Image (spheres, rainbow, N blue to C red):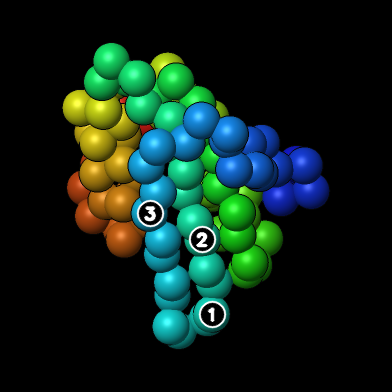
Amino acid sequence: MDHNRRPRNFRKPEDANRQAEGYNPLCGDQITLYLAVADDKIADVGFQAQGCAISKASASMMTESVKGLSLEDAEKVFKEFRSMITLEDFDPDVLG
């Protein structure tokens, strides 16, 4: 619940040079993810969201887990996270 009440990285970084948007038509949740990428690493990350507590907290936790990672490693984390939330097999060691 703490990540919902006090989400980490709930902002648009000033030096963001990548952006992605997501929308869930079933519940109406919306998220915009911002990355500041330098030398193939995520130097900073932020997000803006409208939605339920679970989506906001999940986005907050995801930004904490990918900050400082290479793009390749962040992609691995994303794939494992997606597998976990869609009830597919996943590697918990990748998620930390």
Outermost residue to the bottom: 26
Q: Give the residue number, with chain letter if any, for mark 1.
A: 28
The residue that label 2 is drawn on is: 31
> Measured from the top left, where is residue 94 in percent x and y?
30, 27
Determine which residue is flagged by label 3: 20
C-alpha span from label 3 to label 1: 17 Å
Above or below, 36 against 33 in this view is above
Return the x and y of residue 38 as percentages of the image width and height.
Answer: 34, 19
Q: Looking at the picture, how far across and down is residue 10, in whole percent?
A: 66, 44
The mark nearer the N terminus, 3 or 1, is 3
Disc 2 versus disc 3: nearer the observer: 3
Q: Residue at x 79, y 48 (%)?
A: 5
Asked if residue 54 can be seen in this view, the reply is no
Indicate which label's residue lies in the foreground, 2 or 1.
2
Residue at mark 2 to residue at mark 1: CA–CA distance: 10 Å
Crowd band around label 2 with a 10 angstrom C-alpha radius: few (<14), some (14–19), many (20+): some
Q: Nearer the viewer, residue 10 or 15?
A: 15
Question: Which quadrant does the C terminus fall into?
Answer: top left
At 63% from the left and 66% from the top, the residue drawn is 50
The answer to which quarter of the image holds residue 13 is top right
Q: Are marks 2 and 3 in contact (CB under 8 Å)?
A: no
Disc 3 residue type (three-letter)? Ala
**Secondary structure under the numbered disc 1 in the rendered image:** loop
Q: Relative to 70, say whether 83 is above or below.
A: below
Residue 90 appears left or right of 38 = left
Q: Neighbour class for label 1 at 10 Å: few (<14), some, many (≥20)?
A: few
Q: Mark 2 belongs to which amino acid?
A: Ile
